[in-house]
Each structure stands twice: as C-alpha cells, then as structure tokens.
Image (cartoon, helix red, strand yellow):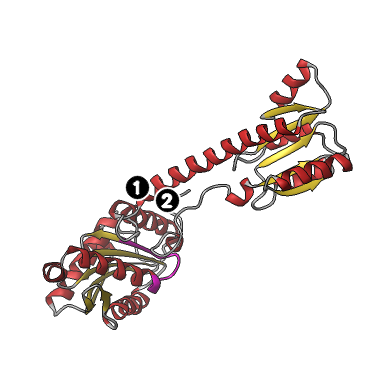
C-alpha cells in the first residue's frame, strides 16, 4: 500500500489498511468440475465443512470468477475441462497480475509421476488422484487454508508496520516525516502545473496549561479530538499531519490565498465553537493558525520557504492574541527552488 494514499482513508475513525484478501475470499472455494454429479458431491462436502462454494463447469467460467472482487482464494480444479483445462488455468493464475495468493488443488484421474510433475510445475499447490478418500481431501484443504491464513496474517502485519512508519501513534494523523514528504510532493507537482498551493501551521493555544492542569492523559485526549475535527473539516485529498507536540501541518493542494483563508477559518471554528469533552469535563480549546499560500502561476518556491512563512504567520497569530488566523502569500523572492 502506498503510504501517501488519500488522507481520508487513513485518518482517525477510519479503518487502517486492510488485509489483502478478505476473510470471505479465504472461506470461499471455487470448484471447477465438468462432471455434474461429482461437482454436486464436492459442493455438498465443502458446504458441510463450512465453506461458501462457487461451482462452475469449465475452466473459462472459473477464470472469470477469479477475476472478480473478493474472488475465492482456494480453488479445486479438475484437470480435464472444456474450454480451459486445469493445467492451462493454473498457468493463467500464476501468470496473472500479482494479488492475493490462490491456493490450487488439482484433481485428476492421471496418476503417472510425470503427470504429477506437470501439474505442480503448471502452478498447482497440491494434487489429488481420483478416486480419493474424502478425509484426505479435507485434510489437504485444511493445509491450504492454513497457508492462506498465514498469508493474510503476514500481509496484515506488513500493513500495520507501514501504517506505523508513516503515522502518529496517538492521533492516527500523518507523522512529521510523512506530512513533510507529502508537502514536498505537492511542491514538486506544482513545478509542472503552476497550480496554487496552501499550507497551514496550526497550534493549540495554551496546551501546556491543559497538561499542567488536567494531566497528560487529558492532554492526549484533547490532541486526539482536535486531530479528529481537523480531518473532518478538510477535503478528502488534503493532508493533515502532526508536526510535533501540539502543532499540526495541513497541506491544501490547488488552494489559493482566498480559499485557504476560508478553509483555515473553518478549522479555527471547528475547534473553538465546541469544548472538548473529557474525563474531567468540558475543556475549551482554541487554535492559532498561520497560512502560507503560493498563487497559481507564481514562480516555484521551495518547501522550506513555504514552511518558514507559515511558521512566521503562526507566530504573528499568537502574538496578536491567539485563536486567530494570519496569512502570507509566498513569492519567488521569499525562497527560490
């Protein structure tokens, strides 16, 4: 998963990156068998074992099923089928686009050792010769299911690590490194487009007093609620990050100075208009915000210059009484890339 995916998919209250291959697809089995009696028999067995079954009668239909969303990750394929036989289907599965691993069990009346080798080299994970014992089939399917479950657990762990590397643990926002990287990407993009760009530095007013008065656990709850409200108040393609401590950095692609001022005032109001509910009661919270905008068509300036001007504007907002918005327009003279 790209750690610079849309902020809306990775904010507090939204699910973290999902496991590739859902539990549904791991508990659904595709049965591709052209013999209708044997196909119904397999279907009854797998239904009894707790699987959802998708039965098809030829390889072409099986391939179509495997292209669908949440397609079965467990496939029972007959070797000899019309349209596309089991060997050809195995090769298509292994040669297709990478995605969730498909565990393939090949069924056949062929019992020659070379046939076994051919099936496994085509991409089958296991091989069962007809007629077979139903208990043996169930045991082999269980082995395949363990592999699919292990795959899901490994992918989930990888996604969690990637999420943790790019996100602030307390708030779920982009962390400092990730939000700065996102900003650099936007600055680089506007080198080509000359589009406008807005950046906001926001700081919780008198946050030290909140910590000193109510304790750090309450302070953490305030940070989490402020983060949640900030995310709810921006567009899905804007990026909100925890810059450090009680300071946030918000990147508004394609936003000129006038629009940025409106958006920043919306952020200020969403925090100031309603106290934060906490274990010690309702706590009034306000933000000071510093804005830096690069107008459409303006010569390219570097990210350091934009950050510096946003920080200067934030300092001005604090010096002029807090709970307010101050803004500057960044020009090439402020910092040449």
Answer whether labels 1 and 2 touch (C-beta < 8 Å): yes
Q: Residue at x 48, y 40 (%)?
A: 154
**Residue 71 falls left or right of residue 55:** left
Secondary structure of the residue carrying tag 1 is: helix
Residue density around tag 2, few if under 14, some if 14–19, many if 20 or more, within 10 Å: some
Q: Residue at x 26, y 80 (%)?
A: 275
Q: Picture coordinates of residue 125 (x, y %)?
A: 66, 29
Q: Is residue 239 magenta?
A: yes
Q: Real-space Cα distance between discs 1 and 2?
A: 9 Å
Start and end of the magenta stretch? 232-241
Q: Which residue is mark 1?
A: 165
Q: Is residue 97 above or below residue 133?
A: below
Could you tell which of marks 1 and 2 lies nearer the N-terminus? 2
The image shows a total of numbered marks equal to 2
Q: Which residue is mark 2?
A: 3
Along the line of sight, which residue is nearer the eye, 182 or 103? 103
Q: Quadrant of residue 115?
A: top right
- Which residue extends farthest bottom? 273
Q: Picture coordinates of residue 176 (x, y %)?
A: 28, 54
Residue 285 visible here: no
Q: Is residue 135 magenta?
A: no
Along the line of sight, which residue is nearer the eye, 82 or 131? 131
Q: Quadrant of residue 335?
A: bottom left
Q: Quadrant of residue 129?
A: top right
Q: Picture coordinates of residue 63 (x, y %)?
A: 75, 43
- Which residue extends farthest top? 113
């Amino acid at each position: 998963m790209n750690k610079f995916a849309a902020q809306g998919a990775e904010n507090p209250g939204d699910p973290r990156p999902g496991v590739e291959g859902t539990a549904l697809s791991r508990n659904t089995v595709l049965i591709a068998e052209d013999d209708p009696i044997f196909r119904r028999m397999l279907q009854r067995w797998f239904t009894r074992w707790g699987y959802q079954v998708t039965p098809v009668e030829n390889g072409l239909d099986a391939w179509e099923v495997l292209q669908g969303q949440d397609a079965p990750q467990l496939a029972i394929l007959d070797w000899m089928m019309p349209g596309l036989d089991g060997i050809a289907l195995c090769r298509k599965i292994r040669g297709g686009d990478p995605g969730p691993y498909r565990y393939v069990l090949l069924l056949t009346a062929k019992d020659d050792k070379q046939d076994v080798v051919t099936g496994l080299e085509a991409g089958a994970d296991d091989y069962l010769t007809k007629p077979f014992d139903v208990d043996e089939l169930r045991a082999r399917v269980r082995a395949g299911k363990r592999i699919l479950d292990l795959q899901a657990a490994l992918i989930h762990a990888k996604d969690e690590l990637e999420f943790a590397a790019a996100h602030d643990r307390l708030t779920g926002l982009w962390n400092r490194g990730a939000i700065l990287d996102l900003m650099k990407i936007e600055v680089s993009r506007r080198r080509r487009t000359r589009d406008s760009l807005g950046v906001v530095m926001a700081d919780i007013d008198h946050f030290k007093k909140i910590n000193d008065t109510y304790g750090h656990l309450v302070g953490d709850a305030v940070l989490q609620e402020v983060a949640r409200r900030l995310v709810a108040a921006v567009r899905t393609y804007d990026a909100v990050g925890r810059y450090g401590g009680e300071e946030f950095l918000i990147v508004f692609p394609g936003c000129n100075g006038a629009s940025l001022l409106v958006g920043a005032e919306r952020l200020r109001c969403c925090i100031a208009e309603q106290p934060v509910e906490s274990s010690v009661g309702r706590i009034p919270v306000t933000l000071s915000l510093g804005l830096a905008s690069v107008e459409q068509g303006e010569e390219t300036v570097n990210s350091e210059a934009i950050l510096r001007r946003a920080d200067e504007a934030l300092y001005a907002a604090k010096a002029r009484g807090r709970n307010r918005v101050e803004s500057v327009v960044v020009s090439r003279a402020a910092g040449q890339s």
